[in-house]
Image: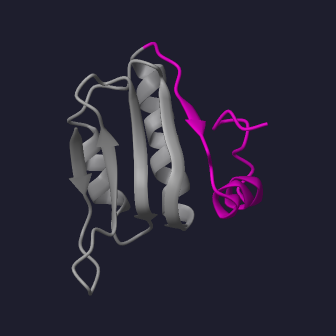
Amino acid sequence: MIARCGPATDDGDCAGRIVAPRDGVQWAFEGALTLGNAGTVLGESAALSLPVSDIVDCSALTAVDSSAITVLLALKRRAVGEGRELHFNGLPAPLLALAGVYDVRELLGIS
């Protein structure tokens, strides 16, 4: 399993990361995805092949802000550029609310 960790929090824990199993079937976001680590997490995801299943599990996100929306949109843009679809499963309620506020639910494939 490949785990990429964003900047550490004050207590040394991983602020957020993207996890990609070696088989590349599915990605997962874990921890926080906020302004403090979104650039790092997105940059590290660029080194990974998109998941074979075209699925990114977001159910383990513990904190989000508008930067998380930016990361998801960038990943969708990348997938389109590679002729692929990308689906986000398990989006937490705060992320769904932000997607509604920014009117990007359709762009993210959220009904």
Residue 48, quarter of picture = top left
Image coords of residue 45 (percent x, y):
29, 41
Q: With respect to residue 63, does 77 lie above or below?
A: above
Image coords of residue 38 (percent x, y):
37, 60
Q: Residue at x 46, y 19 (%)?
A: 53
Question: Which quadrant would the C terminus be assigned to in this image?
Answer: top right
- Taking 88 as reference, is 3 left or right? left
Q: With respect to residue 20, does 23 lie above or below?
A: above
Question: Which quadrant would the N terminus be assigned to in this image?
Answer: top left
- Taking 57 as reference, is 16 left or right? left
Residue 94, quarter of picture = bottom right
Q: Nearer the viewer, residue 89 or 75?
A: 89
Q: Residue at x 49, y 55 (%)?
A: 60
Q: Which residues are magenta?
A: 83-111
Residue lying at the far bottom in this picture: please name it. Answer: 10
Image coords of residue 91 (percent x, y):
62, 49
* Residue 36 among those drawn in magenta: no
Report the coloring of the rendering: one colour
Q: Residue at x 35, y 26 (%)?
A: 50
**Numbered marks: total:** 0
